[in-house]
Each structure stands twice: as structure tokens, then as C-alpha cells.
Image (spheres, rainbow, N blue to C red):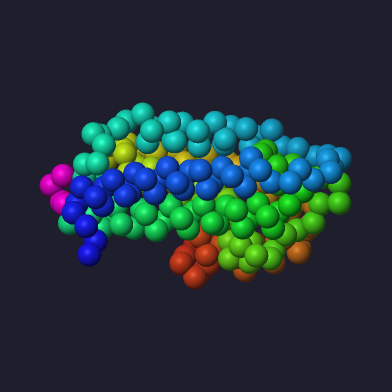
Amino acid sequence: MMGTPEQVYEGSVAAMLVGWVGYAVPFLFRKKPPKLGERKRDPRSNLGILIQSVSYALVWSLRRPLFTPLLPRFPTVSLGLAVISVILSFLSAGLVGWAVRVLGKQWSFTARLAEGHRLVTEGPYALMRHPIYAAMLGMLLVTAVAISHWMAIPPAILLFAAGTRIRIRSEESLLQEAFGQEFADYRRRVGAVLPRALRPAQEPEDL
């Protein structure tokens, strides 16, 4: 038994909170690697971070009453989205932990190249070039379904997409410069935020 609608909505809020804790843990408690010398940094990524932050502010601030359906006129759809959000919360937290572990000492908040930087293509990076952004998108949607007013969701997604595109272009310009054809081949093989199998093959992609 799935439980009453109220229990499902309560579960989606609880899963959201657990997901955010799971999302933060890999960053807060990862073993600090030796500091690497920096070769190059692209400050344009800071604008992308700011825009992404606004998208999160929208879903956290434009709220509906707790434990109520996202779409009151469509209770079945709302229940289905709540159940999906529970699954997505755990998937997103697991994905970010996997990605941070694989990146190791190369992880950075802003776009940069470190001394001895290598092109990471294993683990989740074999599925998508930016799995941490995929996890961020997952948690944005989880939060929206759990607590937000539905009107916050379209602008939040658009803002997140705009900020993520800026960050991807900033990071990938550095990678293209550093790794040339190796990165170009990787970019053709692997989707940016979604696995290539989920995207039309001919679609140009920053997301």
C-alpha cells in the first residue's frame, strides 16, 4: 500500500530534506586533497552560479501549504509526481556523491584548470559530462514538487537552464583549450546533463 495522499505528500517533503542532506555530505565531508596549483580560471562561471542560485530561491520562497498537492485540480498527477520526487531525491544525492568521489582533487566550485588536470570520463562522466548539474536539476525538481507553488516551477527551470548553460560553456571552453580533440570526441559521445540516449542525436547541446 502506498498510503494516503497526505502520507505521500509528507513522504515527499521528508525525502526532499534527506536528499538535500545527502547532496551536501559529499562536499562537506570529503577528504581534502592536497591543494593543486591553478593554471587557469574562467570567472564567467560566477554569473551562472548566481543565476542558478536565483532558481533555487524561487522554489524555496514561492511556497504552497505543506503536505498539499502541487496541482490541486489534478490529484492523481500530483500523487504521481510526489512518488517520482521521492525516487529522484535519492538518485540525485547518490549521483552527486558518485561524481564528487570520481572527480577527487579536481572538483572546484568555479570553472578552472589545475596543474596536472586530466579529462575525467569514467564513472558518471561516462554517462553525462556534468553529472553534478544533473543532480542539481534533480534536487530543484524534487524541491519544487515537495513544497513549491506550481507557478514557481517554469521560471525556476528556465533560470536554472540559463545559469547551467553559462557554467557549461565556461568550463568546456577551458577543457577544449586544454584537451583539444580528446575533449571534442568526448563531447560528441556523451550528453551534457542528460545521457545521450535521452536526447535527439542531432540536437546541439549545452543541456
| Residue 27: in magenta span | no
Query: Where on the picture, by quarter, is residue 81?
Result: bottom left
User: Which residue occupies 22% across, 57% down?
Assistant: 3
Residue 182 location, x and y as percent? Answer: 76, 64
Numbered circles on residues, count: 0
User: Which residue occupies 77% across, 48% down?
Assistant: 105
Query: Where on the picture, by quarter, is residue 13?
Result: top left
User: Which residue occupies 15% across, 51% down?
Assistant: 74
Front residue of this view, candidates 112 and 28:
28
Above-or-below relation of 5 to 2: above
Residue 154 location, x and y as percent? Answer: 34, 42
Q: Residue furthest top?
A: 61
Prevailing secondary structure class for the magenta stretch in the rendered image = loop
| Residue 73: in magenta span | yes
Residue 87 location, x and y as percent? Answer: 39, 58
Front residue of this view, candidates 89 and 59:
89
Front residue of this view, candidates 138 and 180:
138
Relative to 54, 96 lies left or right:
right
Front residue of this view, candidates 30 and 204:
30
Relative to 145, 22 lies left or right:
right
Query: Where on the picture, by quarter, is residue 109?
Result: top right
Residue 189 location, x and y as percent? Answer: 62, 68
Q: Quadrant of the N terminus?
A: bottom left
Q: Would residue 169 be seen by someone viewing this image from the given angle? A: no
Above-or-below relation of 196 to 158: below
Relative to 167, 91 lies left or right:
left
Q: Would residue 56 be seen by someone viewing this image from the given angle? A: yes
* Magenta residues (range): 71-75
